[in-house]
Image (cartoon, helix red, strand yellow):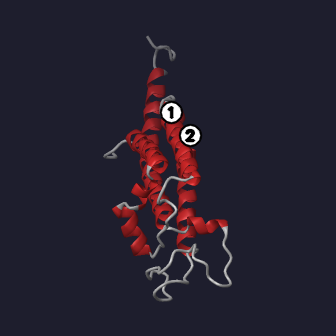
Amino acid sequence: MALISVKTILTSLCLFHITLAYFFYTNPNAIAEQVLVYVLGEAMGMPQTSSFAAPSSASSFLAVTLFVLGLSDLLTLSMPEEIWLIHYWGAQAPLRITLFAAISLFTYFSTPSYGRSSPNRLSHPLAPPSTFVAGSTVTGGDGLRNRVFFTFALLEFLSWFWVWVTLKEEAGRFVARKKRRGSSGSGSNGGLRY
C-alpha cells in the first residue's frame, strides 16, 4: 500500500504547476535562484541562464501554459474515479514519463562542451550557450540548455514516475474491488440489489 495516495500526489503536482506559473509570471528569477536548480545545474554541468532575470513574453507564455496545464489536470480529478484512475491517468502518466525523460536526456546530452573548464561533459561551464562562438549556429534548442529547464524536466520525470507507480498499485486495487462488488451482486437474488 502506498504511503501517499495517487490523488494526493496528482493534486500536489497540479498545485506545483500553478505555483510555478505564478512565479514565472511575476518573478522568474526566484525560480532560477532556487538552491535545487543551482545544485542540479552544478552537478550536471548545466550552464546558467539570464533569460529569467526579469519577466518576459516567453516567461509569461510559460506561466499561462503551466497554469492551464495545472488547472486542467486538477479538474480531471473531479471526474468519476474509474475514469481518471484507470483511463485518463493510466494513459497520461507513461506518456509524460517518456516525454520528460526524453527532454531531460536531450537537455543534458545536447549541452555543448565548448566554453567549459575542461573537455569533460560534467565540467563547469564558463559561459552560457548564448555567447557567440565562431563557427556555431544558434538553434531553438539553445534556449532549453540551461539549469532551470533541466531541473524542471528532471523533477517532472521523477514526479510522473512516482505517479505511475502509485497509479498502477491503486488501479489494481480498484479493479479487484470492482470485481468483488460485481461477483457479490450476482448472488441468490439474480443480481438485484436491495
Q: In which quarter of the image is the N terminus?
A: top left
| Residue shown at 46% from the left, 21% from the top | 185
Numbered disc in front, either 1 or 2: 1
SS state under label 2:
helix
Q: Mark 2 points at which residue?
A: 88
Q: What residue type is labelled 2?
A: Tyr
SS state under label 1:
helix
| Residue shown at 57% from the left, 76% from the top | 131
Q: Name the residue under label 1.
A: 75
Q: Quadrant of the C terminus?
A: top left
Which circle's residue, 1 or 2, is located before the other in the chain? 1
Q: In this view, does 131 lie to the left or right of 174?
A: right
Give the Cα separation between the discs numbered 1 and 2. Answer: 12 Å
| Residue shown at 37% from the left, 41% from the top | 5
Report if residue 23 is visible in the image.
Answer: yes
Q: Residue 38 or 59: which is nearer the viewer?
A: 59
Give the image location of residue 187, x and y in percent.
Answer: 46, 20
